[in-house]
């Protein structure tokens, strides 16, 4: 099970595990930052309470994953809260089933995570430094990882035990490869130039006043702790760098590339040891007049490699027996060994490709080495200063001066920014969320905000400008354009409705198009994968009901551009499995089974949620 988790730990689950590592106090039963006992929970699942800080962190994780996309803040907060609840419901359920993950399995998983890797190996110092910075013991961290792995194990047990029948597969391809014959005309949006009256502009402004508000803005002062900045302060001598170079030498060394071939003379029921050895000696003599690969093809008892001239590929130490490896490593290019004994029999071995390994000299990697050394040396100080910044900003919640003076970090400031947009550090959504949080707007320091690139920020409010409605003269042109667009869309909808009713009354698409001077587009055998028509239109066509008794189905599709497309769906043909589909049937069956399994798991989780003791505070 752990292997499967590792194989699939590149998607959502790996992201969740990374959050457990990189966010000091994340999900799944982790207590709040400080003094949560005085807070009112925003939600509870059984005896487990979630506070505003939990919700804020979950929201930040969601919004960070949707960076550079438009999303509704309130909707996203609601989704984040639901995710917190569902995770806790699942955790309590797997605990009730007494499902467990061993400490050894959890440790093995932790040591495999990229976050704790340095030069491809588990870095215990980095692991311990991070735990120390969060005030967390190794056993506590392992416990949290075990919770996450147990939940994942349960989900995979449900999903991966589902299956799809041949009937399911046939039904899938009937729908997937379905073909539809359609005709359609487009009623284009026509621009209107007639200007609205002042009365109409005033009325529109009054009705849509919320759309013309100047958004709430804040500016903040902040302290930023950066690992890169601390690394730049580290002075590295040549002596220190040379010692570090020796430690890291494997990283700057290209390993030897050695490709080998062999001829095997097996010791078995038919051939004893002495006979196999004699065969090897005789073959060694034959190599004076015959190529190694040709001889291997004709006489090697390793039938799998014989057809490729005895080729064993690139040599990898630790795979073969010691005597074989010693011989393979001692040979020069194209040199043939004497008979080498193994548990399989006797081998003649040759090296067919040899590229010597080499190490990059110190001077050529000095610049890169310096940066790596500086960053490594700065890590411990970064975590220590992070702890001090957290403590001082909390103990002196009404100013940043104490932390600034103690840590020697200069206070920086931002320009005004909104909840949705900002410049500089305010372009980070985590910073904007913290700046507009209730605590900061009250005048307190924010919690430490972790940013990408090993940065830690604490901020406080500098200036706050509430949202205000703009004057009508400031937005007059915007209002005019909105009125004209609304009117143009309405006229297009009305015209499309009249034309649609004519088609539904029996008029043909061709006759209608000719009368109205509209171009007709026809598609025979349209499939879901057809890229010739807009996706929005294709979706509507394949969602439409099928024609009955040969009578076409007429419907209108509103497009994002404002155009209205009138469609006549004339025929639907069930899909069939193509020859290519048959080749992919096994994969398709697995994918279907996964879909069924995930649907079953979601139903199971929803059922658990319905029966759980859940309380959500109404705001």
Image (cartoon, grey):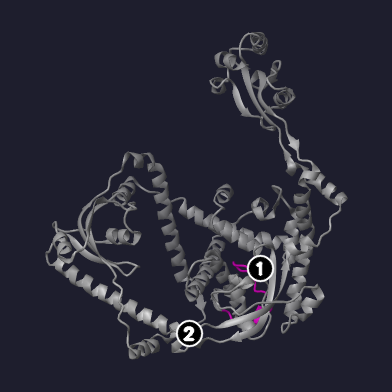
Mark carried by residue 213: 2
Residue 48 in sight in this render: no
Q: Position of residue 167 (x, y in %)?
A: 31, 47
Answer left or right for 268 relative to 607. right
Residue topped by disc 1: 450
Q: Residue at x 58, y 59 (%)?
A: 15
Mark 2: which secondary structure? Answer: strand
Mark carried by residue 590: none
Q: Nearer the viewer, residue 524 or 127?
A: 524
Q: Position of residue 449 (x, y in %)?
A: 66, 71
Q: Residue at x 22, y 72 (%)?
A: 495
Q: Position of residue 165 (x, y in %)?
A: 35, 47
Rate crowding at label 1 as few (under 14), some (14 to 19) or many (20 or more) other CA atoms within 10 Å: some
Q: Nearer the viewer, residue 491 or 369?
A: 491
Asked if the magenta segment contains residue 25, the reply would be yes
Q: Position of residue 276 (x, y in %)?
A: 64, 12
Answer left or right for 167 relative to 414. left
Q: For residue 395, which quarter of the picture?
A: bottom right
Q: Residue at x 82, y 60 (%)?
A: 234
Instruction: From this view, report whether residue 356 is shown above or below residue 450.
Output: above
Q: Which residues are magenta?
A: 23-41
Rate crowding at label 2 as few (under 14), some (14 to 19) or many (20 or more) other CA atoms within 10 Å: some
Q: For residue 193, which quarter of the picture?
A: bottom left
């Amino acid at each position: 099970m752990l292997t499967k988790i590792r194989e699939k730990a590149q998607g959502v689950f790996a992201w969740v595990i990374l959050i457990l590592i990189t966010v000091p106090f994340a999900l799944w039963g982790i207590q709040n930052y400080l003094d949560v006992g005085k807070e009112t929970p925003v939600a509870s699942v059984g005896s487990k309470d979630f506070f505003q800080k939990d919700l804020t962190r979950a929201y930040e994780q969601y919004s960070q994953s949707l960076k550079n996309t438009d999303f509704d803040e309130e909707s996203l907060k609601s989704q984040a809260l639901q995710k917190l609840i569902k995770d806790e419901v699942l955790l309590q359920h797997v605990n009730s089933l007494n499902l467990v993950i061993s400490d050894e399995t959890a440790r093995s998983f932790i040591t495999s995570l990229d976050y704790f890797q340095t030069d491809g190996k588990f870095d215990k110092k980095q692991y311990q430094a991070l735990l120390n910075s969060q005030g967390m013991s190794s056993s506590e961290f392992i416990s949290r990882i075990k919770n996450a792995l147990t939940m994942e194990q349960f989900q995979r047990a449900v999903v991966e035990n589902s299956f799809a029948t041949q009937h399911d597969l046939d039904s899938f391809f009937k729908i997937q490869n379905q073909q539809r014959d359609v005709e359609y005309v487009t009623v284009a949006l026509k621009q209107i130039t007639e200007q609205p009256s002042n009365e109409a502009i005033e009325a529109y402004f009054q009705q849509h006043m919320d759309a013309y508000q100047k958004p709430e803005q804040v500016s903040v002062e902040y302290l930023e702790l950066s690992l890169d900045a601390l690394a730049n302060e580290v002075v590295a001598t040549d002596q220190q760098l040379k010692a570090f170079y020796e430690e890291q030498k494997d990283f700057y060394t290209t390993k030897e590339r050695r490709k080998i071939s062999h001829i095997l003379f097996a010791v078995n029921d038919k051939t004893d040891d002495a006979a196999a050895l004699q065969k090897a000696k005789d073959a060694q003599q034959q190599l004076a007049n015959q190529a190694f690969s040709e001889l291997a093809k004709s006489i090697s008892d390793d039938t799998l490699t014989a057809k490729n001239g005895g080729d064993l590929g690139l040599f990898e130490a630790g795979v073969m027996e010691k005597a074989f490896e010693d011989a393979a490593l001692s040979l020069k290019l194209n040199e043939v060994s004497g008979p080498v004994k193994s548990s399989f029999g006797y081998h003649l071995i040759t090296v067919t490709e040899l590229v010597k390994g080499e190490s990059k000299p110190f001077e050529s990697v000095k610049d890169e080495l310096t940066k790596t050394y500086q960053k490594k040396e700065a890590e411990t100080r970064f975590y220590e200063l992070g702890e001090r910044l957290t403590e001082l900003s909390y103990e002196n919640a009404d100013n940043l001066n104490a932390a600034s003076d103690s840590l020697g970090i200069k206070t920086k400031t931002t320009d005004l920014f909104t909840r949705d947009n900002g410049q500089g550090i305010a372009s980070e959504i985590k910073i904007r969320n913290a700046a507009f949080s209730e605590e900061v707007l009250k005048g307190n320091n924010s919690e430490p905000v972790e940013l990408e690139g090993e940065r830690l920020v604490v901020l406080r409010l500098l200036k706050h400008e509430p949202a205000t409605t703009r004057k009508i003269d400031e937005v007059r042109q915007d209002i005019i354009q909105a009125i004209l667009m609304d009117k143009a869309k309405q006229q297009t909808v009305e015209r499309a409705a009249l034309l649609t009713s004519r088609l539904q009354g029996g008029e043909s698409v061709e006759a209608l198009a000719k009368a109205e001077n509209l171009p007709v587009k026809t598609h025979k055998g349209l499939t879901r994968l057809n890229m010739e028509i807009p996706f929005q239109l294709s979706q509507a066509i394949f969602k439409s009901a099928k024609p009955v008794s040969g009578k076409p189905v007429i419907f209108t599709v509103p497009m994002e551009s404002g155009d209205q497309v009138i469609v006549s769906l004339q025929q639907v043909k069930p899909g069939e499995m193509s020859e290519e589909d048959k080749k992919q049937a096994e994969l398709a069956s697995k994918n279907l089974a996964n879909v069924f399994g995930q649907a079953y798991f979601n139903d199971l989780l929803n059922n658990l949620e319905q029966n759980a003791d859940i309380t959500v505070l109404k705001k």
